[in-house]
């Protein structure tokens, strides 16, 4: 019999056959689907408009820092792996391990923001700001909206980190699952944004 960090509250037990499951409950998945549709429509509009300004889109796309974009892709995907590990260990009752991987998730998310801030600074210095042209409008709006999602995710994860440190038995597993699902949504959105913005044009 394995040893856990602490005893799991019976209330944390989830009936995985419940029709209201997926992980985190149906509400978070409705939100995720709506967010994905929003980004999808925006990207589709970008691709359609690029046909009338193909030269501009090619020129501006070439100015994006693919190295930083690629690095951020690796960082965010790694954070998703850490988040999955944290949730796994929490379900198993290993709260200290869950906390450790949650810290790694927070660190990775923070690195993503720092790298994005460096890229934003480069764009501002070069004069490629919001309002410069159609491509940059899409770039700033799409990446900025995604960055807001990452920041919201970090706030939620920070809250759970504090609760795991103080009273893990009070945490509802569905709440942590919902936050993990939201974080994975940020990963998924970036996996779509990166190739369209940095590679397509």
Image (spheres, rainbow, N blue to C red):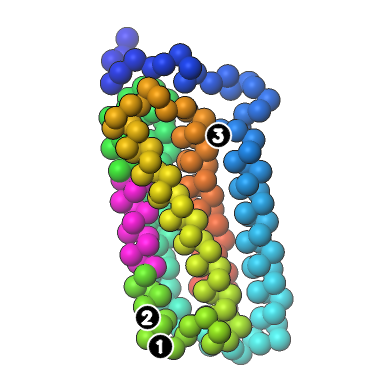
Residue 109, position as x, y percentages in the image: 37, 54
The x, y position of residue 53, in whole percent, is 66, 87
Of marks 3 and 1, which one's residue comes earlier in the chain?
A: 3
Q: Kindly identify which residue carries mark 1.
A: 126
**Residue under the point 34% across and 56% down:** 110
Q: Would residue 95 appear left or right of 48 to someone viewing this image?
A: left
User: For the point 64% across and 68% down, which residue is it?
Assistant: 43
- Say if 29 sits above or below 46 in the image: above
Numbered tag placed on residue 24 in the rendering: 3
Helix, strand, or loop for circle 1?
loop
Name the residue rendered at 30%, 18% in the picture: 6
Q: Is residue 61 left or right of residue 87?
A: right
Q: Specify the quadrant that holds the C terminus.
A: bottom right
Query: How would you rate the neighbour count of disc 2 (Cα within 10 Å): few for under 14, some for 14-19, many for 20 or more?
Result: some
CA–CA distance in space, label 1 to label 2: 6 Å
Q: Quadrant of the N terminus?
A: top left
Query: Percent from the top left, x then y, of residue 131?
Result: 55, 84
Q: Residue shown at 57%/61% (left/top)?
A: 192
Task: Give me the disc on residue 122.
Answer: 2
Magenta highlight range: 104-116
* Left or right of 85 on screen, residue 181: right
> Is disc 1 in contact with disc 2, using a CB cutoff of under 8 Å?
yes
> Is 126 above or below relative to 89?
below
């Amino acid at each position: 019999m394995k040893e856990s960090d602490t005893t799991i509250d019976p209330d944390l037990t989830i009936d995985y056959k419940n029709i209201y499951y997926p992980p985190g409950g149906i509400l978070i998945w409705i939100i995720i689907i709506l967010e994905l549709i929003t980004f999808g429509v925006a990207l589709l509009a970008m691709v359609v408009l690029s046909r009338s300004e193909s030269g501009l889109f090619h020129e501006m796309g070439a100015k994006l820092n693919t190295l930083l974009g690629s690095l951020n892709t690796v960082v965010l995907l790694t954070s998703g792996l850490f988040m999955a590990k944290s949730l796994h260990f929490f379900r198993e009752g290993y709260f200290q391990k869950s906390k450790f991987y949650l810290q790694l998730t927070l660190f990775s998310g923070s690195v993503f923001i720092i790298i994005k801030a460096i890229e934003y600074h480069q764009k501002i210095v070069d004069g490629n700001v919001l309002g410069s042209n159609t491509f940059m409008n899409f770039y700033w709006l799409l990446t900025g909206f995604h960055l807001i999602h990452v920041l919201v995710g970090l706030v939620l994860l920070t809250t759970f980190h504090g609760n795991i440190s103080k009273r893990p038995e009070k945490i509802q597993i569905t709440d942590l699952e919902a936050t993990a699902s939201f974080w994975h949504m940020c990963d998924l959105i970036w996996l779509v944004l990166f190739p369209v913005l940095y590679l397509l044009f």
